[in-house]
Image: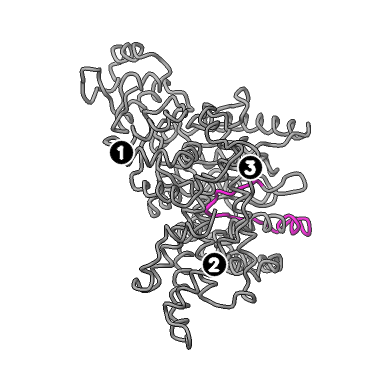
Amino acid sequence: MAIINSENIVGTKEIGDLFGVSSSAVVNLQNRYIDFPVPIKRLESGPIFDLLEIQEWGVKHNRIPIRNTVPIEAGDHKSIAIVGLPRTGKSYSSSVFVAEHECFVLRRAFSGAGDDFTQCAVKIIVSSKIMEPYAQFNTENEEERQYSRIDEKSLINFVTEINAYLKQKRESGAEISPSEYIEIFVQPSQLAAEILNENKLSYLIITDTPGVSDSYELVQIAEAHLVMLVLTDSGGETARAGFKKIVEGIAPLVAAGDACFLYNLKKPCDDEEEYADMQREAETAMQSFEAEFAPLRKSIIDTSMNILHPSKSVLGIPGMKDRRINFAEEAFRQRLKEVINRSFKGEGLELINKELQDSLKEAITGAEQLTEEGICNSFLNFLTNVLSQIPRLASDLTKPDYFQTFKSKNHARVKSQDGYRIDNAVKIERKDSLSRLYQSFSTYTAENTPDLLKQAGIKLFYKLISEELKSDSGIGVGIHPWEDYPPITMRAIEYTLASELEQAFLQGANDPAHTYCDTMKRNGIISKSWHCVRIDVNKLYLLPILKNCGVLSLHSSNLMELVRNRYIGGLRKVGEFKAWEQCLEAFDTKITANFSPNNLVKSTGI
């Protein structure tokens, strides 16, 4: 199939793929319907059309299956995870990001008449590009996969059926797979639209998780950029024990500061004065939870956590309505937007960089024996040692390397076509890598590392490496109407084939997307939608980093190890590269002339 150079243009073949019909059937539709979109241009090979016009027409005439109405272009995104105990208002909190009509449908569908109705993770993908909202249940078993439009009756029936299926599965002793979750694709609320616009994002992912209890463990949320913990004033000691379990579970994820508390008081507030009273009540209530963080306070990285002193950062949740947005909810949304924007705009990173600059000046001013060059060398050597101490899992060297086998396994660039093989491996290895990173960095305390410059360096590296592990950054972008967001499977393959891709690009690429896809195809990767792959040329700098740092030379005896070494290990090294860049920028360039981020990344081992 020919590569389409413009992501907004389609021919009759692509329209047929979209509608699920042949090219000749598309021509018949064009002749039959007077309102069928007019071609942009007629080429010798046939007419070409505007993709958005085709999608709008397809939805209007029920020609596009609801699964095909997801965003038509990818881009930067951020993810928010909402966690808490059962019946605390997590689903209500997630609904504030959703356009008004769907917001209230979701509240009624997931509230369960006061019961904790969320029995699996619910990922809400919010984008202005979504033409028609819908929900789907993802599962490795194709026969169990379901879809639903977002109207009250359909969605309630949809959720009820899924909950019954999951309950039966649990009662049989089976575990719920990470690949079993509900996805909801919707337009943004005004709150979400403003967050998207102000942070230059294409979409948000909000993950609503089941309440943590004796029956439900904390759902793994390793990819979240911001964790929102929702509490309420009920439950007593049982609630406190569950809360402690949550704090311990998310510590590796939020140690860099990306967390906030929401305290659900459910109190009506009709004016600013009543809202202020409610907020003060939430702050007072949260003070009783601060003791749960005592074990974390000694670690250098944990001292930057927003949740170390929850009463100072908590947001009270007022009483909200089922069918309209009242004054209290509007006030809450505005305050929530401020918290999210601070997190997304990296204000935590700015504070760490300021701490690095200030502590460096203090070290230079107070130095009696060391020169600035000596301080720089000591600082870089210390950080090199810190990074070298991160635990690595050994590979089984008695087995042959898996890379050549990987290329023969007919892996697909899209997770569903790949049978979730790579996707599941990424989820497991990402969680484990973040856990090992946290365990290693949390051993550094103010007592054993009193030097403020070194403390700032530890915080900087933990922040940037953990952020990169959550980001799934990569070169490939998919614009297929039902593309994965983000395309984790494709990017894991991309990192695995980084050496082959770099070589192909070095040989010259008039069409980068064609070069990218052709390289993947030559290495055994399959797809039904190569024509929908685009390249972010601003990310091509990743390939030489991956080739230079050594992850591509690691022995891998199976798929899990290959993903761990090349993709997760590659993400960690990219984060390390960015941290070395910032460290070197803090010193005089004359002093750092003999250092480079590439060499430093290589020196810390793999």
Q: Amino acid at mark 3?
A: Leu
Counting residues from the start of the chain, the first of labels 2 and 1 encountered is 2
Closest to the observer: 143 or 582? 582
Label 1 sits on a secondary structure element that is: loop
Image: magenta residue range: 219-243
Whether residue 226 appears in magenta in the rendering, the answer is: yes
Image position of 604 (left or right of 512): right
Question: Which badge, 2 or 3, comes first in the chain's sequence?
Answer: 3
Distance between the alpha carbons at the discs numbered 2 and 1: 40 Å
- Which residue is disc 2 drawn over? 458
**In terms of image quadrants, where is residue 499?**
top left
Judging by the rendered image, the residue that carries numbered circle 3 is 397
Q: Which residue is mark 1?
A: 507
- Residue that sits furthest to the bottom in the current view: 368
* Residue 77: percent from left, percent from top: 45, 47
Residue 53 locus on image (x, y percent): 31, 28
* Image height of 544 relative to 182, above or below: below
Q: Position of residue 534 (x, y in %)?
A: 36, 36
Q: Observer-nearest residue: 429 or 562?
A: 562
